[in-house]
């Protein structure tokens, strides 16, 4: 879930008794949910003690410090609001988790984000102002990103944007990803909705948001096995059940770059009728640079994507290596203001919004018939692994029927 901020100060809200602007002095206080200690006993996370420390050290005075404004967005686990600091009248965004509806996985997300954000300071990463708790909720207060997500930026371009401008945005994105990976953090849910702009200015900084699925790992070695993420952005090794590591973020970044440049996701086509079919396409690396959509996109851009969407994670370029790619380093003359080397962004917006809605419905539908498709996908994934190399042939395939598609699975679909 991104920090979906569309601007607008809280001038109407200070001291207001409007029902749409909850007063910090008269908050509802429902019965407190289960304790964080009891919930986290079931969490398989090497940093459980650190997460508990985040919870225990959380500030207790959110309602006395901030006033809530309008709703900015809603994700799988929390709701984002605009909020204002009463003393300074500065505006922020805040992510609110209902403690009465928390399970262990959601609590892990709620505590992981402030734990990691406090350890990072980079212009391309969302800044955390503070983490608060009340009897009925946890609240992460963050900087307000007034530029909205990438969809909003594209909408403002009046249907086209130059490939060179996309190059600038992608470079900022990869620079932030390099920073994250150097700190041994794997994001695990990179997608267009989680890339947001600091402001509405033409040269606004792009920021990575939503670190609820992120995790800090001990080294570059692939050690993770939990199946999570947004289906269309998941790397093959996640679908197979791991082990996996930082390269999964590069795969997701490749899906993002592909989509930004042509207007549709790489593994979205007429034959993707359910989640297993989508996973099949991903495991095979079944994507193309179709005509006419890619006719005017540079060969360098296509080569960059090819290096990111390598099915074998050991053959996939790192984020640091990608920044040395010719697409970023070669100085090219300004491109003409014509359809050449431009992207139809209205098509991007429409197709992606539609795709996400369809995918969300397919995921829900697929939970009911996972077993019937499991054998086929298992066979497919093993065949693909064997085709890569002998060492990968022994890698396990995740049990979709028993893990991925149960309600507890940490899917992120918006």
Image (cartoon, rainbow, N blue to C red):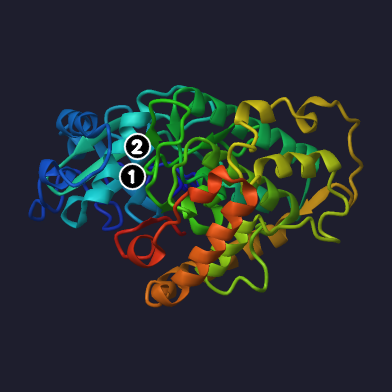
Q: Is residue 357 visible?
A: no
- Nearer-the-camera pick, 278 or 341: 278
Q: Could you tell whether 188 is left or right of 273 in the image?
A: left
Label disc, if present, on residue 113 of the rendered structure: 2
- Write down the quadrant of residue 335 in the picture: top right
Residue that protrudes farthest toward the front in the picture: 390
Q: Residue at 74%, 49% (x, y): give it.
A: 261
Callout 2–callout 1 Cβ contact below 8 Å: yes
- Nearer-the-camera pick, 183 or 26: 183
Label disc, if present, on residue 95 of the rendered structure: 1
Task: Tell me residue 44's x, y (percent).
Answer: 26, 42
Q: Residues within 10 Å of mark 2 (few under 14, many from 20)?
A: many
SS for dot 1: strand
Mark pair 2, 1: CA separation: 10 Å
Task: Tell me residue 326's x, y (percent).
Answer: 80, 29
Q: Residues within 10 Å of mark 1 (few under 14, many from 20)?
A: many
Numbered disc in front, either 2 or 1 = 2
Q: Is residue 174 visible?
A: yes
SS for dot 2: helix
């Amino acid at each position: 879930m991104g920090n979906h901020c569309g601007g607008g100060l809280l001038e109407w809200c200070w001291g207001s008794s409007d029902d749409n602007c909850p007063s910090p002095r008269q908050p509802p206080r429902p019965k407190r949910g289960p304790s964080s200690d009891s919930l986290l006993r079931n969490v398989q996370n090497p940093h459980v003690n650190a997460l508990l420390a985040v919870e225990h050290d959380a500030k207790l005075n959110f309602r006395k410090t901030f006033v809530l404004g309008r709703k900015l967005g809603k994700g799988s686990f929390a709701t984002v609001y605009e909020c204002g600091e009463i003393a300074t009248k500065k505006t922020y965004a805040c992510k609110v988790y209902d403690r009465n509806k928390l399970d262990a996985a959601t609590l892990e997300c709620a505590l992981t984000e402030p734990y990691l954000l406090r350890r990072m300071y980079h212009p391309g990463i969302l800044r955390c102002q503070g983490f608060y708790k009340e009897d009925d909720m946890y609240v992460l207060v963050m900087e307000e990103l007034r530029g909205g997500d990438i969809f909003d930026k594209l909408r403002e371009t009046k249907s086209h944007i130059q490939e060179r401008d996309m190059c600038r945005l992608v470079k900022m994105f990869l620079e932030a990803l390099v920073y994250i990976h150097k700190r041994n953090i794997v994001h695990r849910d990179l997608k267009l909705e989680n890339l947001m702009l600091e402001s509405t200015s033409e040269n606004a900084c792009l920021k990575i948001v939503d670190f609820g699925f992120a995790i800090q790992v001990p080294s570059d070695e692939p050690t993770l096995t939990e199946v999570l993420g947004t289906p269309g952005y998941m790397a093959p090794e996640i679908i197979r059940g791991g082990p996996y590591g930082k390269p999964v973020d590069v795969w997701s970044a490749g899906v993002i770059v592909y989509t930004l440049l042509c207007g549709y996701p790489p593994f979205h086509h007429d034959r993707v009728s359910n989640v297993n079919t989508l996973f099949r396409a991903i495991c095979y690396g079944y994507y193309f640079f179709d005509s006419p959509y890619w006719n005017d996109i540079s060969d360098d851009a296509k080569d960059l994507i090819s290096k990111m969407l390598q099915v074998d994670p050991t053959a996939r370029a790192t984020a640091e290596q990608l920044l040395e790619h010719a697409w970023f380093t070669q100085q090219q003359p300004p491109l003409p203001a014509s359809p050449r080397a431009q992207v139809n962004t209205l098509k991007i917006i429409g197709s992606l919004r539609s795709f996400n809605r369809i995918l969300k419905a397919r995921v829900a539908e697929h939970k009911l018939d996972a077993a019937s498709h499991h054998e086929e996908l298992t066979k497919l994934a093993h065949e693909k692994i064997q085709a890569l190399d002998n060492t990968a042939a022994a890698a396990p395939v995740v049990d979709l029927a028993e893990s991925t598609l149960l309600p507890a699975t940490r899917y992120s679909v918006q």
